Image (cartoon, rainbow, N blue to C red):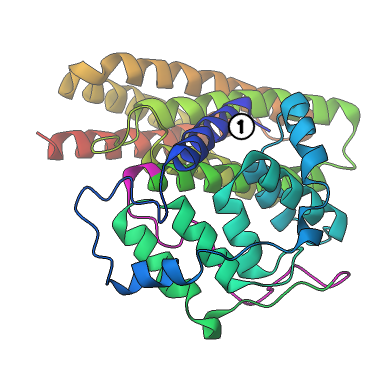
Amino acid sequence: MNPRIIATTLFALTVWVDTASAAPGYPNTRYFGNPVNPQARWYRACMRVRDAAPPPSDLAGADAAAGGAQRARCDAQLLYYDTLDNANAPAADWARVRACAFATHDQAVLMMLYANGLGVAENRDLALKYACSLGGAPLELRGRTETLSHPSQSAARPVEGDALPGAGIALFDQCDDAASRLTINTCAAIAQRRDAHAAQLRLETLAARWPAQDRAALARLQTALQAFADARGRYEADLMGTLGTLYAPAAENARAAETTQFLDDLQRYEKGWLPKYTPGQHAGFTSQLDQAYRKVLADDPQDAAGVQATEQAWARYRDAWVAFGAVRYPAVPAQAWEARLSARRIQQLRKLQREGTGRK
């Protein structure tokens, strides 16, 4: 797993959980800004479930987890989504998620557990209480209370030994009603981590039976890929209007696009659909790439340093592909890999140039 993705997700979730847990009062209207109408339907729904409490049996292990949370720094958010993405997660895994959520007072995870009946008996009233305690932007709190107040929108409860809980049914999620910048950026970090985790599993399955030298070359290529993807997300994504302290959705999408393209390519190559380019095509792409790169630098000198850093990361990624290709696909000449990657980089730079022109 890319350490930057993990660090980004942890930072975003720390801000999210700390902000929510520090908010006073019930319902949590810390970020409403305007006076609250106690006759509003969402407010009355929150007050109706104010005294809802989890069954004593659900609290078993929470005290032990609280001590463990201090030692191991358990993160209920990461545990929740990792368990959710594991189709074969046993009941014990959900018990760990629940214990960690109680120990760390993670209202968002507790809300989702009881709303979806994951490792606990589904309890919409209790989920609603946690939603009201979690708070958030007005649209977020109102949206969650509206959803959780309607039992007809209930998700299927998991049964031990069955497939992924709620298979075929959209589970309730903290990101469903995202409306604030903080929530949107937090949810982007969650999605990025989940996508990266799924991609890593796909890659491990694909390369499981490769020779050791092929896997070693792949590991070096992955390192270069992540460096390039990070540079694209940091310097070439449109970050206007987003929180600078968090990785914005545009940046996450840029990173995810590179990883997805890489996996798609690798799967095609493993089926024998290898790149074929002539020396003339290679020379043409090299020339076009140089022109596109110089044009971006000339048109937007303020962002030149970032584009230069990204281009250097791309060059290292290109060289890593050539080295990997020589090991895994020795029949393919280096110029074919270079031409394929140059053609894509030209498209990225031209798009970047068009976007830069449009902002002027």
Identity of the residue drawn at 57% across and 59% down? 111
Q: Residue furthest left?
A: 360
* Left or right, residue 28 beside residue 123: left
Residue 147 against residue 86 in the figure, above or below:
below
Residue 309 at least partly seen: yes
Nearest the viewer among 188 and 341 is 188
Q: Is residue 197 visible?
A: no
Q: Secondary structure at mark 1?
A: helix
Query: For the point 42% across and 21% down, which residue is it?
Result: 310
Residue 166 in magenta stretch: yes
Percent position of residue 188, x then y: 46, 45
Q: Residues within 10 Å of mark 1 (few under 14, many from 20)?
A: some
> Residue at label 1?
6
Q: Position of residue 266 (x, y in %)?
A: 67, 44
| Membership of 76 in magenta stretch | no
Q: How many numbered discs?
A: 1
